[in-house]
Image (tube, helix red, strand yellow):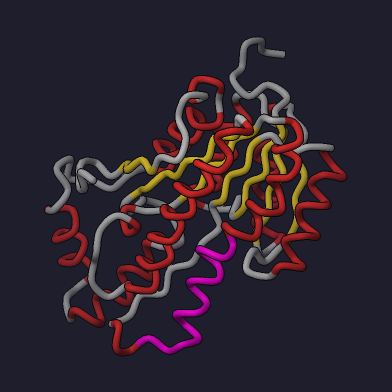
Protein backbone atom coordinates (compact mmCIF):
# COMPACT_ATOMS: atom_id res chain seq x y z
CA UNK A 1 0.00 0.00 0.00
CA UNK A 2 1.23 3.46 -0.87
CA UNK A 3 2.43 5.33 2.21
CA UNK A 4 2.00 8.99 2.98
CA UNK A 5 -1.31 9.47 1.21
CA UNK A 6 -3.14 12.54 2.50
CA UNK A 7 -6.44 10.86 3.43
CA UNK A 8 -5.18 7.43 4.44
CA UNK A 9 -7.98 5.58 6.28
CA UNK A 10 -10.12 8.72 6.60
CA UNK A 11 -13.84 8.02 6.27
CA UNK A 12 -15.59 10.32 3.82
CA UNK A 13 -19.29 10.81 3.09
CA UNK A 14 -19.98 12.40 -0.31
CA UNK A 15 -23.51 13.33 -1.35
CA UNK A 16 -24.17 13.45 -5.07
CA UNK A 17 -21.20 11.12 -5.43
CA UNK A 18 -22.14 9.39 -8.68
CA UNK A 19 -21.59 12.10 -11.29
CA UNK A 20 -19.67 15.24 -12.22
CA UNK A 21 -18.00 17.04 -9.34
CA UNK A 22 -18.90 14.39 -6.76
CA UNK A 23 -17.50 11.63 -8.91
CA UNK A 24 -14.26 13.56 -9.49
CA UNK A 25 -13.88 14.17 -5.75
CA UNK A 26 -14.49 10.48 -5.04
CA UNK A 27 -11.71 9.55 -7.47
CA UNK A 28 -9.25 12.07 -6.03
CA UNK A 29 -9.97 11.06 -2.45
CA UNK A 30 -9.68 7.37 -3.30
CA UNK A 31 -6.23 8.03 -4.78
CA UNK A 32 -5.24 9.50 -1.42
CA UNK A 33 -6.35 6.45 0.58
CA UNK A 34 -9.83 7.45 1.78
CA UNK A 35 -12.68 5.10 2.59
CA UNK A 36 -15.75 6.37 0.74
CA UNK A 37 -19.46 6.36 1.50
CA UNK A 38 -21.21 7.65 -1.61
CA UNK A 39 -24.86 8.60 -1.89
CA UNK A 40 -27.04 9.68 -4.80
CA UNK A 41 -30.66 9.48 -5.89
CA UNK A 42 -30.08 6.51 -8.22
CA UNK A 43 -28.23 3.30 -7.53
CA UNK A 44 -27.04 2.45 -11.05
CA UNK A 45 -24.53 5.29 -11.44
CA UNK A 46 -23.27 4.68 -7.89
CA UNK A 47 -22.36 1.11 -8.76
CA UNK A 48 -20.45 2.34 -11.80
CA UNK A 49 -18.34 4.57 -9.58
CA UNK A 50 -17.69 1.71 -7.15
CA UNK A 51 -16.28 -0.35 -10.02
CA UNK A 52 -14.01 2.52 -11.01
CA UNK A 53 -12.71 3.06 -7.47
CA UNK A 54 -12.06 -0.52 -6.38
CA UNK A 55 -8.46 -0.58 -7.72
CA UNK A 56 -7.48 2.12 -5.20
CA UNK A 57 -7.98 -0.32 -2.32
CA UNK A 58 -10.08 1.69 0.10
CA UNK A 59 -13.42 0.58 1.49
CA UNK A 60 -16.41 1.78 -0.54
CA UNK A 61 -20.08 1.75 0.39
CA UNK A 62 -23.10 3.35 -1.27
CA UNK A 63 -26.60 4.41 -0.35
CA UNK A 64 -29.55 5.73 -2.36
CA UNK A 65 -30.92 8.82 -0.61
CA UNK A 66 -32.79 12.09 -1.09
CA UNK A 67 -30.94 14.81 0.82
CA UNK A 68 -34.04 17.01 0.90
CA UNK A 69 -35.89 14.43 3.02
CA UNK A 70 -35.02 14.31 6.73
CA UNK A 71 -35.84 10.63 7.23
CA UNK A 72 -33.84 9.65 4.15
CA UNK A 73 -30.86 11.63 5.43
CA UNK A 74 -31.06 10.07 8.88
CA UNK A 75 -31.12 6.58 7.36
CA UNK A 76 -28.18 7.45 5.11
CA UNK A 77 -26.01 8.76 7.94
CA UNK A 78 -26.88 5.82 10.16
CA UNK A 79 -25.93 3.45 7.34
CA UNK A 80 -22.62 5.28 6.95
CA UNK A 81 -21.92 5.00 10.68
CA UNK A 82 -22.78 1.30 10.62
CA UNK A 83 -20.26 0.83 7.80
CA UNK A 84 -17.43 3.07 8.99
CA UNK A 85 -18.09 3.75 12.72
CA UNK A 86 -17.32 7.44 12.20
CA UNK A 87 -17.36 10.11 9.49
CA UNK A 88 -14.18 12.18 9.36
CA UNK A 89 -14.97 14.25 6.27
CA UNK A 90 -18.30 15.34 4.82
CA UNK A 91 -18.67 16.66 1.26
CA UNK A 92 -22.08 18.20 0.60
CA UNK A 93 -22.18 18.04 -3.18
CA UNK A 94 -25.75 17.00 -4.06
CA UNK A 95 -27.61 19.69 -5.94
CA UNK A 96 -30.07 20.51 -8.70
CA UNK A 97 -30.39 23.32 -11.21
CA UNK A 98 -33.73 24.60 -12.52
CA UNK A 99 -33.31 27.84 -14.47
CA UNK A 100 -36.19 30.18 -15.23
CA UNK A 101 -37.12 33.84 -15.36
CA UNK A 102 -38.01 34.95 -11.84
CA UNK A 103 -41.60 35.80 -12.81
CA UNK A 104 -42.06 32.37 -14.37
CA UNK A 105 -40.86 30.19 -11.50
CA UNK A 106 -43.54 28.02 -9.96
CA UNK A 107 -43.54 27.66 -6.19
CA UNK A 108 -42.84 23.95 -6.66
CA UNK A 109 -39.72 24.63 -8.77
CA UNK A 110 -38.35 27.26 -6.40
CA UNK A 111 -39.10 25.08 -3.38
CA UNK A 112 -37.41 22.04 -4.91
CA UNK A 113 -34.17 23.92 -5.59
CA UNK A 114 -34.05 25.37 -2.08
CA UNK A 115 -34.85 22.02 -0.45
CA UNK A 116 -32.15 20.07 -2.27
CA UNK A 117 -29.40 22.69 -2.46
CA UNK A 118 -29.82 24.41 0.93
CA UNK A 119 -31.92 22.21 3.19
CA UNK A 120 -29.90 19.22 1.98
CA UNK A 121 -26.72 20.80 3.31
CA UNK A 122 -28.50 21.69 6.56
CA UNK A 123 -29.92 18.20 7.11
CA UNK A 124 -26.81 16.18 6.26
CA UNK A 125 -24.42 18.47 8.15
CA UNK A 126 -26.62 18.53 11.23
CA UNK A 127 -26.79 14.72 11.20
CA UNK A 128 -23.01 14.28 10.84
CA UNK A 129 -21.72 16.99 13.21
CA UNK A 130 -22.47 15.32 16.60
CA UNK A 131 -19.79 12.67 16.02
CA UNK A 132 -17.27 15.28 14.91
CA UNK A 133 -18.06 17.44 17.94
CA UNK A 134 -17.56 14.47 20.25
CA UNK A 135 -14.13 13.71 18.72
CA UNK A 136 -13.25 17.42 18.37
CA UNK A 137 -12.13 16.81 14.81
CA UNK A 138 -13.73 16.98 11.38
CA UNK A 139 -13.93 18.55 7.95
CA UNK A 140 -17.08 19.76 6.19
CA UNK A 141 -16.83 20.84 2.55
CA UNK A 142 -19.88 22.42 0.92
CA UNK A 143 -20.03 22.67 -2.85
CA UNK A 144 -21.60 26.08 -3.38
CA UNK A 145 -21.16 28.21 -6.53
CA UNK A 146 -20.06 31.59 -7.76
CA UNK A 147 -23.85 32.01 -8.08
CA UNK A 148 -23.74 32.27 -4.29
CA UNK A 149 -21.50 35.33 -4.52
CA UNK A 150 -23.01 37.32 -7.39
CA UNK A 151 -26.31 37.87 -9.19
CA UNK A 152 -27.04 36.28 -12.57
CA UNK A 153 -30.12 36.21 -14.77
CA UNK A 154 -32.74 33.49 -15.10
CA UNK A 155 -31.63 31.35 -12.14
CA UNK A 156 -32.74 33.21 -9.01
CA UNK A 157 -33.76 30.00 -7.23
CA UNK A 158 -30.31 28.51 -7.74
CA UNK A 159 -28.55 31.73 -6.71
CA UNK A 160 -30.70 32.07 -3.61
CA UNK A 161 -29.92 28.49 -2.60
CA UNK A 162 -26.16 28.94 -3.09
CA UNK A 163 -26.12 32.30 -1.28
CA UNK A 164 -27.74 30.35 1.55
CA UNK A 165 -25.06 27.66 1.45
CA UNK A 166 -22.32 30.28 1.74
CA UNK A 167 -24.11 31.96 4.65
CA UNK A 168 -24.59 28.61 6.34
CA UNK A 169 -20.91 27.77 5.81
CA UNK A 170 -19.80 30.97 7.50
CA UNK A 171 -22.11 30.57 10.50
CA UNK A 172 -21.48 26.86 11.07
CA UNK A 173 -17.76 27.39 10.56
CA UNK A 174 -17.74 29.97 13.35
CA UNK A 175 -19.80 27.76 15.68
CA UNK A 176 -17.66 24.68 15.05
CA UNK A 177 -14.28 26.42 15.36
CA UNK A 178 -14.17 25.70 19.09
CA UNK A 179 -14.46 21.97 18.31
CA UNK A 180 -11.58 21.93 15.80
CA UNK A 181 -14.02 21.31 12.93
CA UNK A 182 -13.31 23.07 9.65
CA UNK A 183 -16.30 24.13 7.53
CA UNK A 184 -15.59 25.64 4.11
CA UNK A 185 -17.29 26.07 0.74
CA UNK A 186 -16.03 25.68 -2.79
CA UNK A 187 -17.61 28.02 -5.33
CA UNK A 188 -17.19 26.88 -8.94
CA UNK A 189 -18.55 28.68 -11.96
CA UNK A 190 -19.77 26.64 -14.92
CA UNK A 191 -18.08 23.24 -14.91
CA UNK A 192 -17.43 20.88 -17.82
CA UNK A 193 -18.89 17.38 -17.77
CA UNK A 194 -21.64 17.93 -15.19
CA UNK A 195 -25.40 17.38 -15.21
CA UNK A 196 -26.01 21.11 -14.74
CA UNK A 197 -24.36 22.29 -17.95
CA UNK A 198 -27.00 20.69 -20.21
CA UNK A 199 -30.09 22.25 -18.53
CA UNK A 200 -28.23 25.57 -18.33
CA UNK A 201 -27.77 25.58 -22.10
CA UNK A 202 -31.22 24.18 -22.94
CA UNK A 203 -33.24 26.54 -20.76
CA UNK A 204 -31.15 29.70 -21.13
CA UNK A 205 -31.15 29.44 -24.93
CA UNK A 206 -34.95 29.32 -24.92
CA UNK A 207 -35.26 32.26 -22.55
CA UNK A 208 -32.62 34.39 -24.29
CA UNK A 209 -33.55 33.20 -27.80
CA UNK A 210 -29.99 32.43 -28.85
CA UNK A 211 -28.30 29.26 -30.05
CA UNK A 212 -26.41 27.02 -27.65
CA UNK A 213 -23.19 27.80 -29.48
CA UNK A 214 -23.72 31.56 -29.19
CA UNK A 215 -24.66 31.25 -25.52
CA UNK A 216 -21.50 29.31 -24.64
CA UNK A 217 -19.35 31.73 -26.64
CA UNK A 218 -20.88 34.64 -24.74
CA UNK A 219 -20.29 32.96 -21.37
CA UNK A 220 -16.71 31.97 -22.17
CA UNK A 221 -15.96 35.51 -23.42
CA UNK A 222 -16.65 36.75 -19.87
CA UNK A 223 -14.05 34.37 -18.40
CA UNK A 224 -10.45 35.70 -18.34
CA UNK A 225 -9.03 32.20 -18.94
CA UNK A 226 -11.57 31.59 -21.77
CA UNK A 227 -12.69 28.17 -20.58
CA UNK A 228 -14.86 26.36 -18.05
CA UNK A 229 -13.60 24.76 -14.85
CA UNK A 230 -12.81 21.05 -14.96
CA UNK A 231 -14.21 18.71 -12.27
CA UNK A 232 -10.70 17.48 -11.47
CA UNK A 233 -9.65 21.02 -10.55
CA UNK A 234 -12.48 21.22 -8.03
CA UNK A 235 -11.49 17.80 -6.67
CA UNK A 236 -7.93 19.03 -6.07
CA UNK A 237 -9.24 21.97 -4.06
CA UNK A 238 -11.55 19.65 -2.12
CA UNK A 239 -8.55 17.46 -1.30
CA UNK A 240 -6.75 20.45 0.19
CA UNK A 241 -9.77 21.35 2.31
CA UNK A 242 -10.13 17.72 3.44
CA UNK A 243 -6.49 17.28 4.36
CA UNK A 244 -4.49 18.42 7.37
CA UNK A 245 -2.90 21.11 5.19
CA UNK A 246 -6.02 23.28 5.58
CA UNK A 247 -6.40 22.97 9.36
CA UNK A 248 -6.10 26.75 9.80
CA UNK A 249 -8.89 27.56 7.33
CA UNK A 250 -12.57 27.69 8.23
CA UNK A 251 -15.78 29.59 7.37
CA UNK A 252 -14.39 30.46 3.94
CA UNK A 253 -16.02 30.36 0.48
CA UNK A 254 -13.40 29.88 -2.21
CA UNK A 255 -14.14 30.67 -5.86
CA UNK A 256 -12.67 28.46 -8.57
CA UNK A 257 -13.88 30.04 -11.79
CA UNK A 258 -10.94 30.78 -14.12
CA UNK A 259 -10.98 34.42 -12.96
CA UNK A 260 -14.63 35.21 -13.67
CA UNK A 261 -15.42 36.62 -10.22
CA UNK A 262 -13.22 38.33 -7.65
CA UNK A 263 -15.38 38.34 -4.52
Give residue 186's position: percent from left, percent from top. 42, 44
Residue that lies at the very extreme toward the top in this rendered image: 3
Please indicate whether residue 230 sits to the left or right of residue 49 in the image: left
Q: Is residue 76 left or right of residue 117?
A: right
Identify which residue is drawn at 68% across, 70% down. 69
Residue at the spot 49% in from the left edge and 71% down from the top edge: 114
Q: Which region of the structure is painted magenta?
A: 105-120
The residue drawn where x is 54% and y is 52% is 93
Nearest the eye: 17 or 116: 116
The x, y position of residue 201, in whole percent, is 30, 69
Horizontal side, residue 3 vs residue 59: left or right: left
**Can residue 152 be seen?**
yes
Q: Residue at x 18, y 53 (%)?
A: 220
**Viewer-proximal residue among 255 and 251:** 251
Task: Please determine whether, in this image, residue 174 is positioned above or below residue 180.
Answer: below
- Number of numbered discs present? 0
Instruction: Say if residue 54 shows up in the picture.
Output: no
Q: Position of residue 187 (x, y in %)?
A: 37, 48
Instruction: Name the spot of residue 123 as percent of width and height, x first.
Output: 65, 60
In the rendered structure, does residue 111 fall within the stretch colored magenta? Answer: yes
Kindly indicate the quadrant of the structure image that contains residue 185: top left
Residue nearest the observer in this picture, 55 or 195: 195
Q: Is residue 116 above or below residue 28?
A: below
Where the N terminus falls, by quadrant?
Answer: top right
Residue 241 forms part of the magenta stretch: no
Q: Magenta span: helix, strand or loop, mainly?
A: helix
Quadrant of the image occupied by residue 136: top right
Farthest residue toward the right?
82
Amino acid sequence: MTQGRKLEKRNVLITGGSRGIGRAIAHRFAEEGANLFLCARRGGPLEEVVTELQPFGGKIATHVADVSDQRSVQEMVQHALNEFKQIDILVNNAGIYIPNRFVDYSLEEFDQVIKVNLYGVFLVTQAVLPGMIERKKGKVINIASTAGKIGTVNQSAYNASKHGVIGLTRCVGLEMAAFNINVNAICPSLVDETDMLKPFVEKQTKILRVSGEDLLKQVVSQVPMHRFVHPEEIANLALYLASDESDGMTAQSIAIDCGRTMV
